[in-house]
């Protein structure tokens, strides 16, 4: 790993952001910040600045996965059902798995993760540790805990033997308001609320969670604190209530209809489709801890997620890439599969890239991410070949020539970590599902 935060990436096809493309380009990063991205010869680069050769490659901004469950099982040789992992692994144990997952994501070109956190596990502290330069990892944007009602998706997500404590659930307007404030005090970057049922044992995805009044209180309180709100909403009614409350993003949106899609586009509400999760479960669920019945139960949501994605795209909804990466069910390291699915269902490669860069940065309200424009964070992924004509190149880790994080080439560090700690081991080639 280079110790300097100054670097030049020269040659190759530089995709600096949607509509900004430079053949045989150059990217200059100084003190961890992009100073220039454009044609060669357009920048004055100090002598002695380290240089990376990107000839024959596509040079992209660091990619963003906007929906991950970081502190989940990272050991793909030891499949553990999600509810067992959640209920039986200690909090420090979960955090160590999370660090391993973070390294796997970074090695795959995803330099920022929006984390759906779990109470008391330590994702906020890990975020701050990485930001302070005390360890290598992707940028983490964290919701430290969800907001869920009694008998809601978050409440039912955990096995019955798991002890509930105060604020694991919030019921009524005042409890919801209190919990937003508590999460803000705990260091939240955004708020996640469960606005519909899910696929946990004992619930149905069509169940609405929370009234419009409760959701509105959550949104208004969060916005007063400059926090955005992500709503887990599969059902049509959960989506409807979330839109009425003014949430910033719909996560999953499996049963999104044409009318709701049009309303999302009008309001500027983002959709994070998380198509990868259902895709992995349908193809390999029984080898990843699911029963055949559970795979069957997920098949309708899988099909409807594809329909909802088409409705959203046709309506002009702003789509943001998110995988729902979670343990062995949807493995860290295979994030680019989501982009392949977007292209398979109608997007161009450039549109798909925008979901993981410019669109995602807009959702995060982070103008320093998602592009290589002057002033942006110096996060870059260099991919062999032309990603704009073959999006599947991103899924093969062997195609990733360089990973640059805040102006530092971390490729060697990640390669060594992969070899020493087995980040690519497992029963499935994570880069080639």
Image: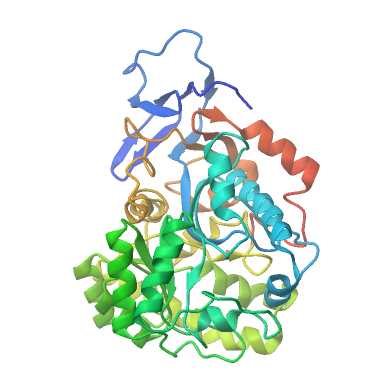
What residue is shown at x 69% (from left), y 66% (from top)?
A: 328
Relative to 130, residue 358 above or below: below
| Number of numbered discs | 0
Answer left or right for 85 relative to 362.
Answer: right
User: x, y percentage for residue 265?
Assistant: 23, 69
Q: Residue furthest top?
A: 47
Q: Residue 158 in the image: x percent, y percent?
A: 63, 79
Task: Please tell me whether residue 203 is drawn above or below residue 123 in the rendered image.
Answer: below
The residue located at (33%, 31%) in the rendering is 375
x, y percentage for residue 397?
A: 63, 46
Q: What is the quadrant of the C terminus in the image?
A: bottom right
Residue reaching furthest left? 266
Is 246 or 392 nearer to us in this picture? 246
Q: Quadrant of the N terminus?
A: top right
Viewer-proximal residue among 404 and 127? 127
Quadrant of residue 278 within the rendered picture:
bottom right
Residue 307 is left or right of residue 414, and the answer is left
Q: Which residue is drawn at 73% across and 61% down?
A: 428
18 sits to left or right of 388: left
Q: Residue 15 appears at what percent x and percent y? A: 38, 38
């Amino acid at each position: 790993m280079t110790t300097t935060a100054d670097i030049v990436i020269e040659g190759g096809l530089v995709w600096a952001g949607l509509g900004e493309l430079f053949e045989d380009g150059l990217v200059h990063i100084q003190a961890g910040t992009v100073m220039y991205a454009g044609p060669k010869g357009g920048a004055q680069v100090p002598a002695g600045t380290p240089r990376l050769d990107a000839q024959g490659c596509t040079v992209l901004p660091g990619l963003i996965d906007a929906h991950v469950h970081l502190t989940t099982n990272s050991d793909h040789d030891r499949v553990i059902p999600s509810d067992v992992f959640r209920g039986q692994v200690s909090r420090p144990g979960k955090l160590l798995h999370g660090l391993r997952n973070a390294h796997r994501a970074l090695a795959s070109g995803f330099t920022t993760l929006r984390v759906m956190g779990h109470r008391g596990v330590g994702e906020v502290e890990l975020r701050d540790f990485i930001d302070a330069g005390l360890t290598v990892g992707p940028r983490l944007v964290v919701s430290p805990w969800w907001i869920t009602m009694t008998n809601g998706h978050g409440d039912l997500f955990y096995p019955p033997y798991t002890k509930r404590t105060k604020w694991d659930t919030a019921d009524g307007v005042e409890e919801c308001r209190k919990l937003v404030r508590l999460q803000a005090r705990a260091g939240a970057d955004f708020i996640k609320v469960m606005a519909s049922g899910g696929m946990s044992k004992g619930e149905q995805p069509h169940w609405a969670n929370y009234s419009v009044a409760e959701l509105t209180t959550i949104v208004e309180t969060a916005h007063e604190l400059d926090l955005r709100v992500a709503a887990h909403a599969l059902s049509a009614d959960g989506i409807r209530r979330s839109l009425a409350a003014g949430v910033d993003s719909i996560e999953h949106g499996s049963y999104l209809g044409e009318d709701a899609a049009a309303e999302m586009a009008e309001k500027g509400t983002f959709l994070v489709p998380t198509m990868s999760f259902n895709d992995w479960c349908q193809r390999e669920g029984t080898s990843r801890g699911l029963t055949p019945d559970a795979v069957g139960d997920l098949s309708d949501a899988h099909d409807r997620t594809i329909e909802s994605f088409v409705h959203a795209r046709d309506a002009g909804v702003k789509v943001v890439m998110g995988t729902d990466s979670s343990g062995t069910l949807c493995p860290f390291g295979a994030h680019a599969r989501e982009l392949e699915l977007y292209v398979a269902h109608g997007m161009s490669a450039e549109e798909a890239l925008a979901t993981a860069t410019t669109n995602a940065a807009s959702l995060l309200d982070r103008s320093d991410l998602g592009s290589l424009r002057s002033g942006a964070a110096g996060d870059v992924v260099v991919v062999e070949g032309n990603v704009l004509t073959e999006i599947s190149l991103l899924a093969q880790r062997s195609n990733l020539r360089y990973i640059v994080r805040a102006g530092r080439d971390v490729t060697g560090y990640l390669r060594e970590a992969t070899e020493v700690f087995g980040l690519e081991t497992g029963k499935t080639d994570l880069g080639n599902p």
